[in-house]
Amino acid sequence: MAGIEKRKVLVTGDSLALPRREVKVRETYPVLLQKNLLKLKSNIKVINHAQYGQTIIGVSQSIEADLASLRPDMVILHVGIVDCWPRKELRGKPKTDLKSFKKHYIKIVNLVKKHNIPLIIVGICPTSIRMDNKYPNTLNQIAKYNNVLKSESNKKDIFFLDMANFIDSSRPNTYLLLDDQHLNRRGSRLVFKLINNHLIRSGFIRIRRK
């Protein structure tokens, strides 16, 4: 109806919410979510502020301004792979150490809580056994960073979407590209379905009965 302000879902984080050469814009999960909301005649707008190469530090620096200017009704945080992945230039160390990752994550959660906004956290995708052999301890590192992301989840206003429940490290390319890091088309559709199901269960998306 005219005159009713749209509710907003803010997606913030790294490139897993963005297109790649193998995944077109229309195949990314924020666009799939928006298309489904339009199909349901919902007054919810998806705003995608994800950035290529974004870290949790970058999100923590921008989130306060985003919350104030955009005034979202829901936030989807999808970040972590850039932070925890071993870097050759750092002699195998991650870009963001675990202590700093936790500090910035808590800052983000507290800011979102301050605005009384529900939060969905998309966990870091486990990589392949092949990658773990190439870069030893990567799977364990991902699990540690995921534990930080999971630590504030309460299944009520902070929901953690655990990608480890769906991605098999021995066969990761069901949902990941051949780099064993980023979502392929099926992976993006999976994340869309999981987020969409949570939004329906939580009552954020209201299904109009005929």
Image (cartoon, rainbow, N blue to C red):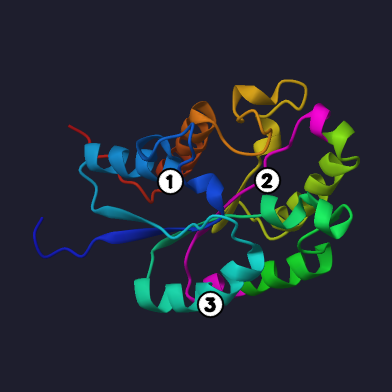
Q: Which secondary structure, mark 1?
A: helix
Q: Is residue 167 above or below residue 145?
A: above
Which residue is at a point 54% across and 31% down the rendered structure image? 184
Q: Which secondary structure, mark 2?
A: loop
Give the x, y percent position of residue 97.
82, 64
Q: Earlier in the sequence, mark 2 or mark 3?
A: 3
Q: Magenta span covers which residues?
A: 109-131
Packing grade of label 1 (10 A; few <14, some 14-19, many >=20) is some
Picture quarter with the N terminus: bottom left
Quadrant of res 105: bottom right
Q: Earlier in the sequence, mark 2 or mark 1?
A: 2
Quadrant of res 60: bottom right
Q: Is residue 195 left or right of residue 97?
A: left
* Residue located beneath label 1 in the image: 199
Q: Amino acid at mark 1?
A: Leu
Which residue is at a point 48% across and 36% down the rendered structure image? 21
Picture quarter with the C terminus: top left
* Residue located beneath label 2 in the image: 124
Which residue is at a point 58% across and 76% down the rendered structure image? 61
Q: Is residue 92 left or right of residue 114?
A: right
Quadrant of res 135: top right
Give the x, y percent position of residue 84.
76, 53
Frontmost of labels 2 and 1 is: 2
Q: Earlier in the sequence, mark 1 or mark 3?
A: 3
